[in-house]
Amino acid sequence: MNGGWMNPWAMGPGMPPYGGAPAYGPFGAPTYVMPGGAIDDAEIASYVRDNIDLDPFIPTRDKNNIDVEVEGGVAKLSGTVNSRRSQFLAYADAFWSIGVTEVETNLQVAEQPSKPTQKSTK
């Protein structure tokens, strides 16, 4: 034994270190039951929003344009972002949020103005 210390991550896959118990929602997606009871949709939405807001790779202008709703553990993202990267990262942030069983994204990527091509002079 390690002097009585137990690695909280050694509890097995899906076991959070804060004492929640894993549960499995629709389609086998993990969701967590906290010691105080199941997580409600409003709390899940705040986790999703926090994960998106804390993502250093999504520009602030995109974060401000993403709307989050959660119904029955299903996170629904909507709004307009400026790049496919932000669209994917927001999806991933929602997917990995505690309590989310599924993600539906209606994020649109804004049309970027085309850059004028330079003509070469030879």
Image (cartoon, grey):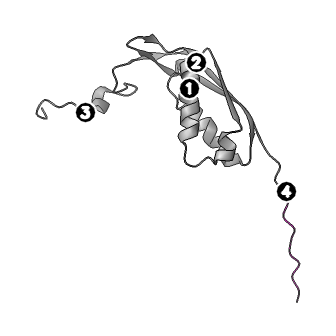
Question: What residue is shown with label 3?
Answer: 7
Tell me the distance, in whole angstroms, between the alpha carbons under discs 2 and 4. Answer: 37 Å
Instruction: Name the quadrant containing residue 70.
Output: top right
Disc on res. 42:
2
- Where is residue 28? Give x, y as percent: 52, 19
- Give yes or no for residue 118 being in the magenta stretch: yes
Disc on res. 46:
1
Q: What residue appears at the point 64 percent right and 48 percent down from the top-left corner?
A: 59
Residues at badges 1 and 2 in contact (C-beta under 8 Å)? yes
Left or right: 84 in relation to 46: right
Tell me the distance, in whole angstroms, between the alpha carbons under discs 1 and 4. Answer: 34 Å
What residue occupies the far bottom of the structure in this picture? 122
Q: In the picture shown, does residue 61 fall above or below 25?
A: below
Counting residues from the N terminus, which is met first, the one under dot 3 or under dot 4? 3
Instruction: Name the quadrant containing residue 34.
Output: top left
- Where is residue 45? Give x, y as percent: 59, 24
